[in-house]
Image: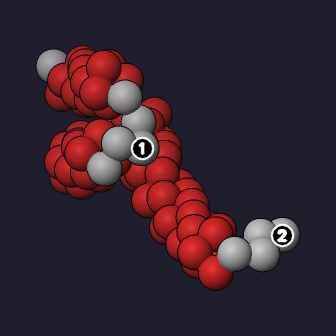
Amino acid sequence: MANIKSAIKRVRLNNESRAHNISIKTDMRSTIKKVENLVEGKDVENAKAALVSAVTKIDKAVQKGLIHKNKGNRQKARLTKKVNELSA
């Protein structure tokens, strides 16, 4: 454990931000799985609504630097492709 006051504060803030980041990433993954489950169940309307929510969560994770920009774009493209194939 750190002895210097500023180092103690850094450790505390790092732990707080780590917990916050984990919750954002978990929420993002949950919305992605929700879209995939709706696609599997062939529920077009709810899948489209969930896709909008998932894209927003992915964009926010990219914006905060939690996932790479290309990974976010890849996830959005794959989800959109699944939903579009369902509705076509």
**Foreground pick, 83 / 70:** 70
Which element carries disc 2, helix, strand or loop?
A: loop
- Residue 53 visible in image: yes
Camera-nearest label, 1 or 2: 2
Within-10-Å neighbours for mark 2: few <14, some 14–19, many 20+: few
Q: Quadrant of the N terminus?
A: bottom right
At x 28%, y 27%, the residue is 69
Q: Do the residues bearing badges 1 and 2 touch, measured as CB atoms within 8 Å? A: no
Tell me which residue sits at (24%, 45%) in the image: 63
Q: Residue furthest front?
A: 4
Vertical placement of residue 85 versus 39, above or below: above
Tell me which amino acid carries mark 2.
Met
Image location of residue 61, percent across then percent down: 34, 47
The C terminus: image quadrant: top left
Residue at the outermost right position? 1
- Structural crowding at the residue carrying mark 1, measured as other residues with C-alpha within 10 Å and reported as few (<14), some (14–19) or many (≥20): some
Residue 1: mark in rendering: 2
> Disc 1 designates what residue?
66
Which residue shows up at 31% across the image and 50% down it?
64
Residue 22's image quarter? bottom right
Total marks shown come to: 2
Q: Give the residue at x 42% y 51%.
A: 28
In percent of width and height, residue 47 lies at 28, 44
Q: Which mark is residue 24?
A: none
Residue nearest the observer in this picture, 39 or 70:
70
Q: Amino acid at mark 1?
A: Leu
Tell me residue 62's x, y (percent): 29, 40
Q: Is residue 87 left or right of residue 27?
A: left
Query: Which type of secondary structure does the marked residue at label 1 adopt?
Result: loop
- Asked if residue 36 lies left or right of residue 70, the reply is right
